[in-house]
Image (spheres, coloured by chain):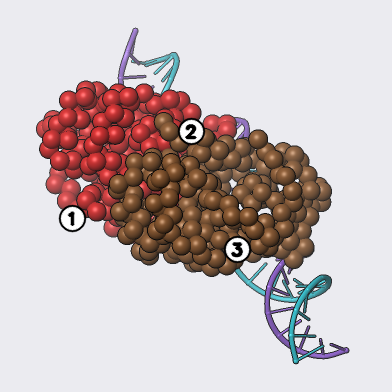
Chain colours: A red, B brown, C purple, D cyan
Amino acid sequence: MHTHPSIFSDDDRAQARPVLNRLLSGLPDDDRARLLALCDTVRLEAGQVLYEPGQTVDHIYFPVGCLISLLAVAEGRMTLEVGSVGQEGMIGASVALGHGQALVRAVVQRAGRASRIDAAAFRAEFKRTASLQRLLYRYTDTLLAQAIQIAVCSRFHVLEARLARSLLITRDRLQSEKFHLTHEFLAHALGVRRVGVTKAASALQNQKLISYSRGNIEILDSAGLEAASCRCYELVKDDGALGMANVFL
Amino acid sequence: MHTHPSIFSDDDRAQARPVLNRLLSGLPDDDRARLLALCDTVRLEAGQVLYEPGQTVDHIYFPVGCLISLLAVAEGRMTLEVGSVGQEGMIGASVALGHGQALVRAVVQRAGRASRIDAAAFRAEFKRTASLQRLLYRYTDTLLAQAIQIAVCSRFHVLEARLARSLLITRDRLQSEKFHLTHEFLAHALGVRRVGVTKAASALQNQKLISYSRGNIEILDSAGLEAASCRCYELVKDDGALGMANVFL
DNA sequence: TTGCTTCCGTGCGTCACCGTACATACAGGG
DNA sequence: CCCTGTATGTACGGTGACGCACGGAAGCAA
């Protein structure tokens, strides 16, 4: 189930082969073709902000190789990651489901490509395509599960465990044991101070579970890190898998 | 906008007139009639647990006069309310949208009636009724917004403000300035110790914002309580309103 | 009255995390 | 080589909430 065939590098080489977004690949051929015809492929750069809460969503994105972080924004500079979206997901679903405004900030955590579609075009396609509807309901349900789990996690679990969870999830999304992620960024995701992350990360490094230097993080002991993390990891992970498992209910 | 025409009592008299669930009343007449034909009306008692996380959902409920609390369950006895559903909402949507398992515990906070429908019947009706689909997407989106806001709130805001918010939301859902709610119950909702609630509630009472005794809570100074609460109140409140505002996008 | 249950209040030591400030260390460009 | 910016490390008092334990008070029933 968990094959990490090779250590992917952090740059574009990992995305050389034209992989399709896994949500889209779950669609029947004709529906997918019609949707893809409306998409264009864009390159997203790390740090780029795609949505800001309250803003009208004008494009939907299906990541291919990039990783998007969903940050709930509180007053001040406080943020909290309520979900992350990689190849297995999409952002902007609320444009078809709810009022067409973003609930959270969507920021690119790792650069890469994505299929992008205009909001109005997507909405029209959504209306006529049953398979697309099923996909979206299911995925929204998965996002909700993620948000709920993260709410619980950030309420009850200590920082060190939450950090471990966060790193493991990033690993899964990127299919790589090493990736770039500064303490500062993690602090925003976890809703804590940067120094808090530094302290927790030091602890994990002292236990030989990870190593890092100037943002380059490597997971050394995957099993050990899972032990140090909270159960939330497995729950969110499984949910992601389940979300994709049987799209046809 | 905010009319609290009369102080409703805590018992059944407030529900004497046959009010319809507001989600259902948003449906076109024929669709609603067909759905209602499949429903039966049940009386839900306070404390009753309708769903438990992971369990298969066998019935969908549309509250009429009762109030349902959605509690995310962590290990141990820890719980955290990630949303509450009154006349303006429903529970069990995931049976049609996602995998048919409950994400959270659903417990009756205030006794009352609800329209109930069998899961399979609902799913079938959902498939054929476009207006019902729109309603559900929108409402799920609203639930997601609620969950996100609560995640932020419980991460960043102090207990006293969160308690104030929680009381205000309960007030809005019940359309009544007085209701029954023990410190113990609030502790479960807020994910804190019972003594924590006692302390925060004392503080609010000393400020003459509320009064309470043996579970009977009364809001004395609505404006003052809003000032003591965090902005999350307005966000969740508005979202609820917006969720209902224009169902036809 | 007694007894029981439910609900609320207090006290105390502990702890994770906060806000702030300052100190190092590495990396790349000039 | 310096210089500058980014990334990481350390230190310290403050505080909100925790866990636990016990005390009191209101309601109910026999």
Q: Residue at x 74, y 51 (%)?
A: B7
Point out the frontmost of discs 1 and 2.
2
Q: Is residue A186 left or right of residue A128?
A: right
User: Which residue, given by chain and number where applicable, does mark 3 sit on?
Assistant: B111
User: Which residue, given by chain and number where applicable, does mark 1 sit on?
Assistant: A1
Q: Chain of mark 1?
A: A
In space, the residues marked 1 and 2 are separated at their CA atoms by 44 Å
Circle nearer the N terminus (3, 2): 3
Asked if marks 3 and 1 touch (Cβ < 8 Å), the reply is no
Q: Chain of mark 3?
A: B
Expressed as whole percent of the image width and height from the top left, the position of residue B92 reads 42, 55
Residue A79 visible to an observer of this rendering: no
Q: Which quadrant: the N terminus of chain A? A: bottom left
**SS for tag 2?**
loop
Q: Chain of mark 2?
A: B
**SS for tag 3?**
loop
Between A110 and C6, the one lying in front of the other is C6
Q: Amino acid at mark 3?
A: Ala
Point out the frontmost of discs 3 and 1.
3
Q: Amino acid at mark 2?
A: Asn
Q: Residue at x 59, y 66 (%)?
A: B46
User: Which residue, given by chain and number where applicable, does mark 2 sit on?
Assistant: B246
Q: Is residue D29 above or below residue B11?
A: below
Q: Residue at x 77, y 63 (%)?
A: B213
Asked if marks 1 and 2 touch (Cβ < 8 Å), the reply is no
Expressed as whole percent of the image width and height from the top left, the position of residue B99 reads 31, 55
Between B117 and A23, the one lying in front of the other is B117
Q: Is residue B33 above or below residue A181?
A: below
In space, the residues marked 3 and 1 are separated at their CA atoms by 46 Å
In space, the residues marked 3 and 2 are separated at their CA atoms by 29 Å
